[in-house]
Each structure stands twice: as structure tokens, then as C-alpha cells.
Amino acid sequence: MKKAIAILCFLAATGLIVWWLAAGHHMWTTTKQGVDVVTKDEIFGTETHTTKWEDKLTPGLMGSGEIKTPADFIMIGPEAGVLILVGGWLIVKGRRKA
Amino acid sequence: MVKLASLLKSAALLVLLSLAAHSAQAQKIAGAAAGPETVTLTDKVGHNQFTWISEAPMENIKGSSAGVTGTLTIDPQDISKLRGTIHTQSATMQTGNATRDRHLLSSEWIDAARYPQISFTITSMKDVKTNGAVATGNAVGTFSLHGVTKAMTVPFKLTYVPESEKTRVRAPGDLVMVNADFTVSLKDFNIAGTEGQIGSKVGETIKVSAQLFGNALRGTTSMAQ
């Protein structure tokens, strides 16, 4: 049982790290993303750029810096670290018992 | 022999006159009326904003600021006479992370409460060239940020569209669009930030892009929110 929980912890930690890497491995969790909207302006005959801030959760290593919304709990570094420690502790404990 | 010398002189004079004429034309916007206008920056013409990027080894941060206001005096027949001031409100800066935004506006960084505006005042123009409705060059002036004012030269591209039925749909008067890219060194403006962050999490220089729109009414030139 302990071994199964430890494996789950390692898998969850790996999943969090993969998510963090895939999302751009940012330092801080962000809840909005600046999207560059390019529009062809017919009057000026050129493209214009507008940054629009859209709601999008991007996980960061250190969280958002404060806890106010559920998204602020996403902090890959501490969470993956705790999962790895718990998984390691369970494995060591299981071996000692055996 | 005398005839040849005289011919050469005439040819040289013609070349000089044509160069002078070309040089005088070089700073004119094609098809625009002469005389100074006041351009007011306004979102009716297009979305005024500054976007910026901080690139550092540990983090790249993208941000924007709005609340752009300003007025420019422009003579489409002589772009080198363009003058004016552009402001953006420090408090409108955002980066997509509310906590980071608060830090950015705090006294450690921008200190938006004490220095609510970031401004650029154009005092002269350099290397102005025009091609049809587009003028390019360098705007020379002073940039004010965080209570510090420094001389700065900003390369720009200005597109000028004379008033027509099509332009009146957006705003009255001639329409102006200005694009400019420049960099700001935080150290130059006494922005120290949180200890150890500049150079690791925040870039020492910030790349800024400005996209400004305004309408020019004869006798006046400005850019307003």
C-alpha cells in the first residue's frame, strides 16, 4: 500500500513538472495571458498590434505570491517537492519495515 | 573650351538645385496640407498602448500599459518640426500576475503613487525621411520615469492619412499613427527593485514598443484617451 502511494506521489510530481515545463517553465504562476491581437488596419494600410489580457492559468514554480483564489495554490516547486519527499519517505519506511 | 566650362557649370547647378529640391521634399508627407496641426492621441483612431518585455535568465515578463494621452504639433509639410509630449499612466501597467503587478507599482520599483506618469517630450527631430504617407526618423527628447528625466533618442515611424470620408468614420481631421521601439535601462532611472532581482528575474533593460494613434485638427495636433 505504501509503495503504491509512493508511486502515485512520484507520478503526480512528474505530472506537475511536465505541466510546468510544457507551459513555458515560468517562475511565477499567472492567471492572465497577454495575447497579441494583430489586425489589418485599412485606413493606415498596415497591421496594428493590441495586447489583450485574457484569463489563462499558467503554472509557475513559485505560485502567484499570495493565496486568494484556488489558482494561487498552484506552485509547482513546493508541491512537486513535497510529493517527492512524501514518496521517498514512504519507500524508506516500507523498506525499514520489511 | 569656354562653352564646355559653362555647360559643366550649368549641369552642376542643375544637380545642386535638384538635390536641394529633393531634400526639401524629403520631409514632406505626400498629399497633406501645409501648416501646423495639433494631433490629439485618441483611442477613437486606434488602440493607444505601450507594450514591454523584460528578458532575464530566470524569467521573461511581458507587460502593457494604457492610459496614453498626449499632444503633438505636426506640420505635414515639414515633419522635422514635429514636437509634443506623450504620457502613460504608471498605474495601468499589468503583467498577468496581480501580485507581481502590485510589486511593480510599489515604491521598490515604479512607485506609481509618487510618480503617476511616464512621459516623453520631443524637443527636436533627426534623420527624417518621408516616403508617401510614411515618415521615419529619430525623435530627440527627454524621457521621464520614476522621477528621473533623461535625454533619449527614439526611432519612429509615422503614418499620416489626410482626412477623407473613410477617415471621418473614426475621427474628424487627418489621422496619425506612430510606432516606436526603444529600450529603457532601469539603472538610468534609479529603479533598484527588490534586491537581487534585476539581472536574474528582471532584465536590466526593458524593450518597449509604442503604438500611438491621434487625429489632427487644423491649427491643433494631439493624442488623447
Image (spheres, rainbow, N blue to C red):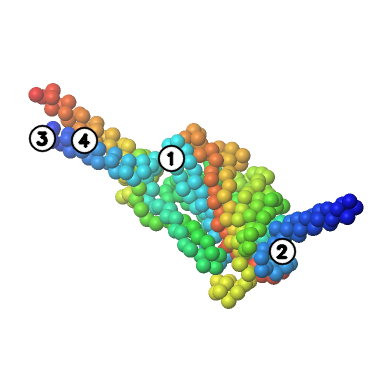
Checking the image for residue B59, the label placed there is 1
- Above/below status of A47 relative to A23: below
What amino acid is labelled 1 in the image?
Answer: Glu
SS label for mark 3: loop
Q: Nearer the viewer, residue B7 or B216?
A: B7
Is any part of residue B22 visible from this angle?
yes
Marks 3 and 4, how far apart in space?
14 Å
- For this orientation, the residue located farthest to the bottom is B165
Badge 4: residue crowd in 10 Å (few <14, some 14–19, many ≥20) = many
Checking the image for residue B77, the label placed there is 2
Marks 3 and 2, how far apart in space?
83 Å
Residue A5 placement (x, y as % from top left)? 15, 36
- Above/below status of A49 relative to A23: below
What amino acid is labelled 3 in the image?
Answer: Met
What is the quadrant of the C terminus of chain B in the image? bottom right
Nearer to us: label 3 or label 4: 4
SS label for mark 4: helix
SS label for mark 2: loop
- Label 4, on which residue? A10
Res B187 quadrant in image: top right
Q: Are discs 1 and 4 both within one chain?
A: no
Chain letter of disc 3?
A: A
What amino acid is labelled 2 in the image?
Answer: Gln
Q: Which residue does the image show at 50% across and 35% down from the upper left?
A: B199
Q: Which residue does the image show at 51% across and 52% down from the upper left?
A: B51
Mark closer to the chain start, 1 or 2: 1
Badge 2: residue crowd in 10 Å (few <14, some 14–19, many ≥20) = many
Checking the image for residue A1, the label placed there is 3
Q: Nearer the viewer, residue B93 or A48?
A: A48
Marks 4 and 2, how far apart in space?
70 Å
